[in-house]
Image (spheres, coloured by chain):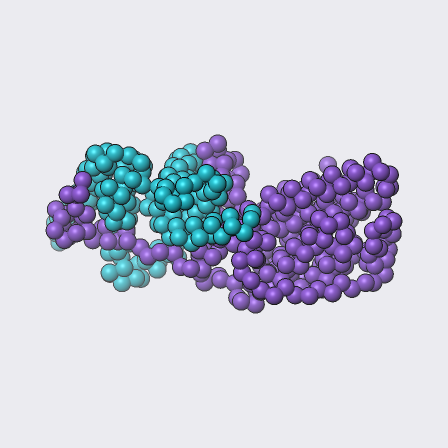
Chain colours: A purple, B cyan
Amino acid sequence: MSDLKHWLDESSDADEFERSILRAGLEGDPPQTTQDRVWSSLMGTLAVAPVLAATASVEAASAKAAAVGVGKASAVWLAVAKGFVVGLAVYGASAGVSEISNRVTIHPAPVIKAARVSAPFSMPRGIETPTASPTAALVPTSEEAQSRDDAAPRVAPHASASANPTPASRESNLPSVASFDDSTQPSTARVSQLEGETRALRRARDELRAGRLSDALATLEASQRQFSVPELYQEREALLIELLYRTGQRSSAAQRAHAFLSRFPESPHAQQVRQFTPR
Amino acid sequence: MSDNVLATFEALYREHFAFVWRSLRRLGVPERDLGDATQEVFLVVHRKLGQLDLEHSIAGYVYAVCLRIASNRRRSAVQRHEQLNQEAEPPELAEQALAADAEAQRLNERRALLAEALDAMSLEQRAVFTLFELEGRTGEEVAALLGIPSPTVASRLRLAREIFRRIVERHRARDQFELRRMGGER
């Protein structure tokens, strides 16, 4: 065994042409940026499971609230909470940034001060009243929508082929790691904004888990104000559509869902959004 | 994920990332799919983290997962009637290749030839060949990584080399034929 000689060894019986072919296969390792990008995507994927678990606990809380007769309004708000959490799960996977990856990349968390405006909704007793419509403040302006159009996440080339996964390739139904072309590396500012948006949403999610629904809503509103041109427009729009639906504004939800699907037919959120269009 | 598990997983990821990337590429996963395939490998590793012997068998286990992922993707690609390593270049890339200098062209030709030879091997032969000849592992290391006896490594390497040489010889013959034809036309 140990007498086997590598062909790249000059003293082996391979000729120079054969060696040159092998040398052509000694390509360099991928750059560090690629390693970091795959890590972020990986952490985003791994973050989905815990978030879905949180959804289940919100559902359980909803059922419990109904059982003790907290009332219909409370159930509606808990449903809204569920919508947020599910949306955040999608967000986490799509952004490729998770609570774990954020913890690994340590940055001081921005202090988001929740602003209070008028209160069109009345909150059930025992839950602090939010002072703005749960959806109005989150509705993106047309400029935001336009500005995000070009920056919308793209599905990797092979993703369409995964639409009909074979049993052998079931692992491939994962959020795709985006383009690995280093020329398209996001700028530091953009990464910083992504991290900021992620932190704000994570905070909102934690507040939801703790049952502080109005705080969660305020955090999301603050996030909308802080990041007036969001990096994650599609994710936020998908969340908003679900919110509109869950709060009973179904025609608005349907209208936005149609607009979303016509603009982003290949969006990873299209399937989620489609369920809020009238059948 | 607890802090300890995350730290262990991240250390494992950082240590093995480049190896996984290279291995998947050499096992025939197309460049465009390398990121997703690498992610799949580490998701599997993450799921099995509690069952792995962190002191000994990690590299072998990681490579076994690479083999499985590459095999799945190979099978899927066949079902989609794709060629893994001989994808048509977009027109602009083809033009760039034409404009590139002769050395770069030679390098591209050799890479294509290597890809052709590797594609002609079975996945098992390809694994042994690339680990030994390109990764520079010894026969014993390859045997340990793949969990197979040393004589099997030697046998697979011999067969893989035969395939490699057959492809190279065919290329040489084509070149000579082309040269003769061009000489005849003059």
Judge from the rendering whether residue B2 lies leftward or rightward of residue B99; answer left or right: right
The x and y percentages for residue A143 are: 68, 63
Judge from the rendering whether residue A41 lies leftward or rightward of residue B136; answer left or right: right
The quarter of the rendered structure image containing the C terminus of chain B is bottom left
Q: Is residue A41 visible?
A: no
Residue at image coords 19%, 44%: B168
From the viewer's side, name the closer residue of A216 and A169. A216
Residue at image coords 64%, 52%: A235
Q: Is residue A49 visible?
A: yes
Q: Quadrant of residue B62?
A: top left
Kindly give the residue lying farthest to the top in the view shown: A167
Residue at image coords 27%, 42%: B142
The x and y percentages for residue A268 are: 59, 46
Judge from the rendering whether residue B146 lies leftward or rightward of residue A43; answer left or right: left
The x and y percentages for residue A276 are: 72, 42
Q: Is residue A114 above or below residue B37?
A: below
Q: Quadrant of residue B53?
A: top left
Residue at image coords 57%, 57%: A102
From the viewer's side, name the closer residue of A101 and A96. A101
All told, the count of numbered labels is: 0
The x and y percentages for residue A11 are: 12, 51
Kindly give the residue lying farthest to the bottom in the view shown: A189
Q: Is residue A229 above or below residue A205?
A: below
